[in-house]
Image (spheres, helix red, strand yellow):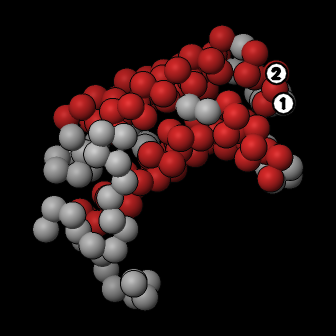
């Protein structure tokens, strides 16, 4: 277990970011999951989190950080494809964001959900990686 004081390698950092991307896609791909999350944390604005959390892990989908071996070619393409759709959806949704139930009825949110499902299918092929040990050492 990491104590938080030692530096981590770029590979291990990439593995952790990859896991956060998978967790994000799990949320974005499931309307049921979004509603359950909102029910557990009613203070949170889940719609804003679905939009904003993507940027926590992916600022630039073409960044060399998203490279082999941690990110397969198919995963790299899934990130770029999803990012393009996410960017358009973020621009197509009103600011401030309406309630989650209203967004779910609209085409942009449905487009985001479908894109997340597609990306998840690609990431599920290899699943999550270890958070403490380099898989590709």
What residue is pinned by disc 1?
Answer: 99
Position above or below: 30 against 56: above
Label annotation for residue 31 = none
> Based on the displayed image, in which of its 4 quarters is residue 92 positioned?
top right
Residue, x 82% and y 21% (percent of image)? Answer: 102
Comparing 88 with 125, the one in front is 125
Residue 88, horizontal then vertical, whole percent: 54, 19
Residue 8, horizontal then vertical, whole percent: 30, 75
Q: CA distance from mark 1 to mark 2?
A: 5 Å
Q: Quadrant of the N terminus?
A: bottom left
Q: Is label 2 in a helix, a strand or a loop?
A: helix
Label 1: how many residues lie within 10 Å, few (<14), some (14-19) or many (20+)?
few
Does residue 48 appear in the picture of this structure?
A: no
Position above or below: 16 against 78: below
What residue is pinned by disc 2?
Answer: 102
Residue 83, horizontal then vertical, whole percent: 44, 29
Residue, x 27% and y 73% (percent of image)? Answer: 133
| 100 to the left or right of 79 | right
Residue, x 86% and y 52% (percent of image)? Answer: 43
| 132 to the left or right of 20 | left
């Amino acid at each position: 277990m990491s104590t938080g004081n030692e530096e981590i390698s770029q590979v291990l950092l990439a593995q952790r970011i990859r896991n956060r991307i998978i967790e994000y896609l799990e949320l974005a791909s499931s309307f049921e999951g979004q509603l359950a999350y909102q029910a557990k944390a009613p203070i949170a604005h889940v719609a804003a989190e679905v939009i904003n959390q993507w940027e926590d892990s992916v600022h630039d989908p073409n960044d060399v950080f998203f490279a082999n071996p941690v990110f397969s070619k198919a995963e790299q393409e899934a990130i770029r494809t999803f990012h393009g759709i996410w960017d358009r959806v973020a621009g197509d949704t009103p600011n401030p964001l309406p309630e989650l139930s209203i967004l779910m009825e609209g085409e942009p949110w449905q487009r985001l959900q479908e894109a997340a499902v597609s990306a998840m299918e690609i990431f599920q092929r290899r699943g999550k990686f270890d958070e403490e040990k380099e898989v590709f050492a």
